[in-house]
Image (spheres, rainbow, N blue to C red):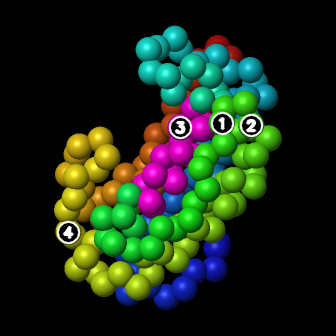
Amino acid sequence: MPNLPDYNYRGARAMVLLHDRYLREFADVWREAKQAGLRLPQVEDPDYQSLDHLLRHVLRAARGYMTWMCEVLSLPDPQIRSTPDTDQIEAELDAYLDHVLEEWRTPLADVPEQRFEETYNSRWGTLYSIDAMMEHAVMHPIRHTFQLKELMTKQTN
């Protein structure tokens, strides 16, 4: 378990730890899918062009959730590097994953609990509280992990 500072709002601390766990799990399952030669279904969504595109999508989202939260809360930029392009994403996976998760650990630690209930428009136009965005960030890799596991099961049958 990562070492985190004390948080004013322990619910946020829990979400940071869960995000770390499930983003790492997604990366492990993504590697299994890549090794198995998993074929993604043909859809119009550009994030599903390939497993590398999907990996970039999930990591870019992890970066985006935290940068958005810091932006709307008027906190300093968390300094999360841009997500590597699809042609580099696999080679840089471990280093980038560690970087994103490290930069997730402290930006929200001093935010008072009541600020997590304030709502803002997300970059895609949906109204979210900070607490709800954190839950969304935790669920995002879980959903894609489930998807990859299900597709691998179907592909091997």
Residue 44 in which image quadrant: top left
Q: Amino acid at mark 2?
A: Gln
Residue at image mark 4? 118
Residue 88: give its label.
2
Q: Residue at 55% across / 73% down in the picture?
A: 105
Q: Which residues are magenta?
A: 54-67
Camera-nearest label, 2 or 4: 2
Q: 33 left or right of 100?
A: right
Residue 128 in which image quadrant: bottom left
Residue 36 in which image quadrant: top right
Q: State how far apart marks 1 and 2 are (Cα).
A: 5 Å
Q: Main secondary structure of the magenta part?
A: helix
Residues tagged 3 and 1 counted as in contact (Cβ below 8 A):
no
Residue 85: give its label.
1
Q: Position of residue 31 (x, y in %)?
A: 73, 37
Q: Amino acid at mark 1?
A: Asp
Q: 157 left or right of 34?
A: left
Residues tagged 1 and 2 counted as in contact (Cβ below 8 A):
yes
Q: Residue at 75% across / 52% down in the picture?
A: 94
Of residues 73 and 61, the one nearer the viewer is 73
Q: Is residue 98 magenta?
A: no
Residue situated furthest top in the rendering: 42
Q: 99 left or right of 91?
A: left
Q: Position of residue 30 (x, y in %)?
A: 66, 37
Residue at image mark 3? 57
- Within-10-Å neighbours for mark 3: few <14, some 14–19, many 20+: some
Q: Upstream in the sequence, badge 1 or badge 4?
A: 1
